[in-house]
Amino acid sequence: MKLDFSHVDISKGLAQIPQAFKVLIDTPNFIKKHQLWKGFLDHSWVLLFSIIIASAFTYTLYRDVHDYFIPGESRDIEINISTDGIDKGIEELEKAMEQIPEEGKAGLEAGKESLEQGKERIEGKHKPLFSGSLKFLLLVFLEVLIYHFAVKTNNILKKTNKVLAFKEFSTAQIRMIKVMGRKWLAGLLMYILISIVCGITGTDYLEDAIMFLVYGYYMGFAFLDNYLEQFHFTIKKSATCIQSHFGAATVFGLFTSIVMNVPVIGPLVVPFLCAIAATRYGHQSQMEDFEKVIKQ
């Protein structure tokens, strides 16, 4: 499959960073002005469910942070995956090494060593502090809250009066599961790739920081996708559009990753705040018009 990133403009993406920050900073005033919490608090069951999920997330997060800095006798990687593919790669390299002259084996030896290092990391010798799986799950569980505020904010900005029924919430929930499932897999593949590259280049100390940025983009993707979903973008079209807004997506995602660490309050505030901020950014940038470019 051929990858096409011709729609991605690096300079424009970097210019989106201050714009997204400004939107985030202005969002509390927007919330206060329009009293966006009204109506949602009437759904007591949703509020109670959100508090339970946020509390469970806080407990699990701080347990993982404790395990990262104070490891016990054994530490399991957050995402349990099979290393069969890596084992197969190592096996194929060994076969190839038997069939080439001695002077040509150095490169293959380096490749084999890199694969073995990647396998060691995956099997649990290093647990990434900024792994996104847990945070992805939080967004999935709180999608009702996220979509509610994305639609309510868009109603204000577009001067519409869309009323959400159970069907819209269930459709949004299913879509969020699909989006986060794909990003979980993409994050896993990126983790393997980055682990191998950092192992080859001797820059293991950069691994967590790079993955923090990667997971940040993926989480910001989820908020912007909620905006584009309202304009009937497919997930594929939404992905193409958001790639061209990677700067903004990364800002919203990094903010999410940081504020989520505030016990209980953070996991509740972030979906509420970023759903509104991402919608405001999407409206200001007219992201919905990107579909016209795709069809050309």
Image (cartoon, grey):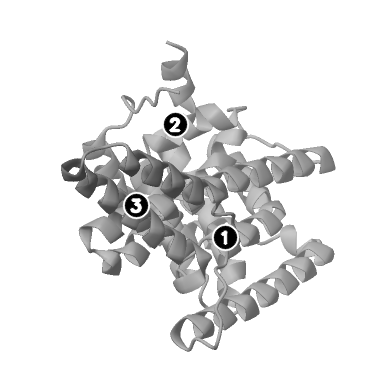
Image side of residue 211 versus residue 148, left or right: left
Does label 2 or label 3 sit earlier along the sequence? Answer: 3
Which residue is at the front of the view, 209 or 256? 209
Label 2 or label 1, whichever comes before in sequence order: 1
Q: What residue type is labelled 2?
A: Cys
> Where does label 1 land, which residue?
133
Please identify the quarter of the rendering in which residue 230 is found: top right
Total marks drawn?
A: 3
Residue 82 x/y as whole percent: 59, 54
Q: Distance between the residues labelled 2 and 3?
A: 38 Å
Mark before the other along the chain sequence, 3 or 1: 3
> From mark 3 to mark 1, how far is it between C-alphas?
28 Å
Q: At which x and y percent is residue 239? A: 49, 34
Look at discs 3 and 1 and give the one toward the viewer: 3
Q: Nearer the viewer, mark 2 or mark 1?
A: 1
The answer to whether 265 is drawn above or below residue 83 in the figure is below
Which quadrant: the C terminus? top left
| Pick the front one: 58 or 286 | 58
For residue 228, side relative to residue 112 (left or right): right
Q: Which amino acid does label 1 sit on?
A: Ser
Q: Between marks 2 and 1, how big is the CA–CA gap?
A: 24 Å
Relative horizontal placement of residue 226, taking residue 250 as reference (left or right): right
Residue at image mark 2 = 241
Residue 112: numbered disc:
3
Q: Is residue 7 above or below residue 10?
A: above
